[in-house]
Image (cartoon, rainbow, N blue to C red):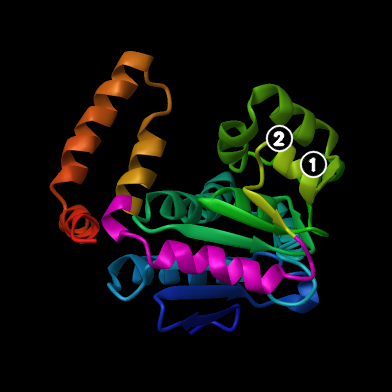
Amino acid sequence: MSERLVVGLGPDGVLTVTLNRPDKRNAIDSEMVGALSAELERAELDQDVAVVVIRGAGKDFCAGADLAELLASVDQTLEQNNADAARLGAVFTSLRSLPKPVVAVVHGRALAGGCGLAGACDMVLAHEDAVFGYPEIQRGFVPAMVMAMLTRSVGEKVAFDLVATGRLLSASAAMDIGLVSRVVGAASFDEEVAGIVGQLASSSPTALALIKKQLHELEGRSFDDAIALGAKVNAVARSTPDFKEAVSRFLKK
């Protein structure tokens, strides 16, 4: 087990993955990328895992890529840098393809690749004091991969503004543009987050998997195609054991 992550599975099926480099504001390095990939693969295969929660240790969620490692990459070949970037990209695609909800619980700063990591999750629950942004432009860098998530969340014009200026957003401003799902007050943060995650964990796993898959497959479809896809998912959902059991239970009340 890598020291870059602290991982725990609760009896409710919630797998909590905590980024564990608080002295570096949980900066993402190659070791953390490998550890995240391994945990997501295990989460997909483990039937006891219902929901994955990603958090950060210490004061921040994640400040982005490890700058020392990023600077060292200047001396690598294009092929080496492409391979390194592809490994991080695989984490983003794994978060998206995992047939289970992934929730980012964000406090403090979620910047650059850290903001991208949160954005790759299905739900982002933000502490009222959280800060979001893509300041890579200030270092002459491009948030290339994370724009794939960003444009889907906020649209092209807002995405360009964020990455071209590097401006930072409060939690409420991030929610206003669609980067955050909910903002939770400081006084009840842990309690409310636990309630939301617990609700997901107790919901039908097949229904959640179908919801996640359909949402992603709607991208780029015409209205007619989207309705046709919905009809197919509707038909499949009616045949699942979870649906039959829930309806039978309701009718017996």
What residue is disc 1 on? Answer: 173
Whether residues under marks 1 and 2 lie with C-beta atoms below 8 angstroms apart, the answer is yes
Name the disc covering residue 177, or none: 2
Residue 134 rendering spot, x and y as whole percentages: 76, 44
Residue 197 rendering spot, x and y as whole percentages: 51, 66
The image quarter in which residue 135 lies: top right
Q: Is residue 148 above or below residue 160?
A: below
Q: Secondary structure at mark 2?
A: loop
Q: Is residue 49 left or right of residue 22?
A: left
Residue at image location 73% in from the left, 37% down from the top: 176
The three-letter code of the residue at mark 1 reads: Ala
Residue 63 rendering spot, x and y as whole percentages: 76, 60
Residue at image location 55% in from the left, 68% down from the top: 195
Image quadrant holding the C terminus, namely bottom left
The three-letter code of the residue at mark 2 reads: Ile
The image quarter in which residue 108 lies: bottom right
Q: Is residue 211 left or right of residue 107?
A: left
Query: For the residue carrying disc 2, how many other residues have a C-alpha within 10 Å: few (<14), some (14-19), or many (20+)?
Result: some
Q: Does the magenta portion include 184?
A: no
Give the magenta-colored segment's residue range.
185-207
Q: Secondary structure at mark 1?
A: helix
